[in-house]
Image: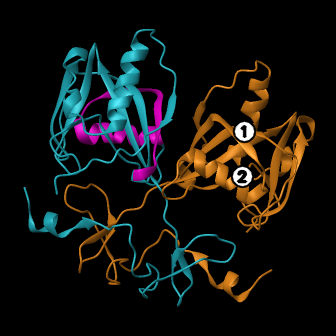
Chain colours: A orange, B cyan
């Protein structure tokens, strides 16, 4: 599936070198009434602020089973995740969560309440997961998923889940199932550094 | 206070014309495995995604009074607000909320729980407000505030508050004070279009 186009295009990294307004090379300054270094344009005056991104997703339940998607993209290729992705301009977190469920699993859902709100500062992200009821067992995984499937609670692939926010959201869900009460949970995920072989 | 520098610099708008990586003029394409138009660079391949921003703030309470700041900046110059501002890279929503309270009011606070989470899709933002206890009545408003002051409940300047998210957060607080229970509230703010004279 690797076309010329898909190997050519890449998401622009955080590091910025040129002004998006006039194309001039950027410098770092502390703007007036600000208190930290920003990428700024000495020619046109544009200051290029950067901010954390929101990831919005769903914990979709079909009877007693949970819908997971097998990632077809990096990071965490070939690991299981709750359907989730970056929030887009002009949508709410709920609309984004429904869109991602459609794109990654092709599942028809009825969205429930916001369930987990997770600060992930080392990734410069905030994650939001909604509860949802799946309305039909038919799934149509999109290009970002190798597969989409329903897992009984005892079959959740804990050792092959994609992200800590997915693991902790599922853990809260299993715990709250005991009482049948699913309040909003807000917490932070600390960065755990892994020593790599490299 | 208007120096040459403060009239020269401005936040870069959403509309992008040049690649931040190589300075080439951008075109709009639908990237491979994507489904919407993005600003992309035909020379280096960088795709310039854009995402909503988070605004993080605090509802600070000193005894029976609420701390508000009078805005010294647009939008909504000279209106009262809860201390709040854009979340920065590398911080949590809680850390950002505390930082903004320090910057805008110079207030010492003890942060409480996350209280309101508000989707504001027409502004391409999500707002977060924490409850907080003010530890000392001394205030040192920063350059983004004309003033900072404590208001008794009956003196809240409802007709001169800055944003709908500030108004609704205060409304929830007054309602929850009746019971003494302050659960997290998540909701959307719809866009209300105002016909202007212009």
Examine the structure image and report whether residue B107 is included in the region drawn in magenta: yes
Q: Earlier in the sequence, mark 1 or mark 2?
A: 2
Give left or right: position of B157 versus A5: left
Q: Dot 2 falls on which chain? A: A
Q: Quadrant of the C terminus of chain A?
A: bottom right
* Identity of the residue drawn at 42% across and 87% down: B25
Q: Residues within 10 Å of mark 1 (few under 14, many from 20)?
A: many
- Spatial separation of the CA atoms under disc 1 and disc 2: 10 Å
Residue A101's disc number: 2
* Identity of the residue drawn at 78% across and 56% down: A106
Tell me if residue A94 comes above or below residue B63 in the rendering.
below
Q: Is residue A192 visible?
A: no
Examine the structure image and report whether residue A147 is included in the region drawn in magenta: no
Q: Position of residue B7 (x, y in %)?
A: 14, 66
The residue closer to the viewer here, A167 or A190, is A167
Q: Position of residue A85 (x, y in %)?
A: 64, 56
Q: Is residue A179 visible?
A: yes
Magenta residues span: B93-122
Give left or right: position of B1 versus B158: left
* Mark 1 lies on residue: A132
Tell me if residue B62 comes above or below residue A169 in the rendering.
above
The residue closer to the viewer here, A162 or A111, is A111
Q: Position of residue B6 (x, y in %)?
A: 15, 63
Tell me if residue B112 comes above or below residue B118 in the rendering.
above
């Amino acid at each position: 599936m690797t076309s010329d186009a898909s190997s050519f295009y890449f998401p622009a990294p955080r590091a910025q070198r040129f002004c998006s307004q006039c194309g001039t090379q950027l410098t770092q300054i502390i703007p007036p009434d600000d208190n930290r270094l920003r990428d700024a344009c000495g020619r046109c005056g544009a200051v290029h602020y950067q901010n954390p991104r929101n990831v919005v997703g769903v914990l979709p339940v079909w009877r007693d089973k949970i819908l997971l998607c097998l990632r077809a993209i990096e990071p965490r290729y070939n690991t299981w995740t709750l359907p989730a992705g970056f929030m887009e301009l002009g949508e709410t977190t709920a609309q984004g969560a429904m869109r991602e469920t459609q794109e990654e699993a092709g599942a028809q859902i009825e969205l429930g309440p916001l369930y987990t709100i997770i600060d992930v500062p080392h990734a410069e992200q905030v994650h939001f997961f909604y509860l949802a009821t799946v309305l039909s067992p038919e799934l149509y995984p999109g290009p970002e998923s190798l597969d989409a499937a329903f897992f009984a609670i005892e079959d959740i692939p804990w050792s092959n889940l994609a992200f800590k926010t997915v693991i902790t959201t599922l853990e809260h869900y299993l715990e709250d199932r005991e009482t049948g009460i699913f309040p909003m949970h807000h917490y932070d995920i600390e960065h755990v550094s892994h020593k790599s072989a490299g």
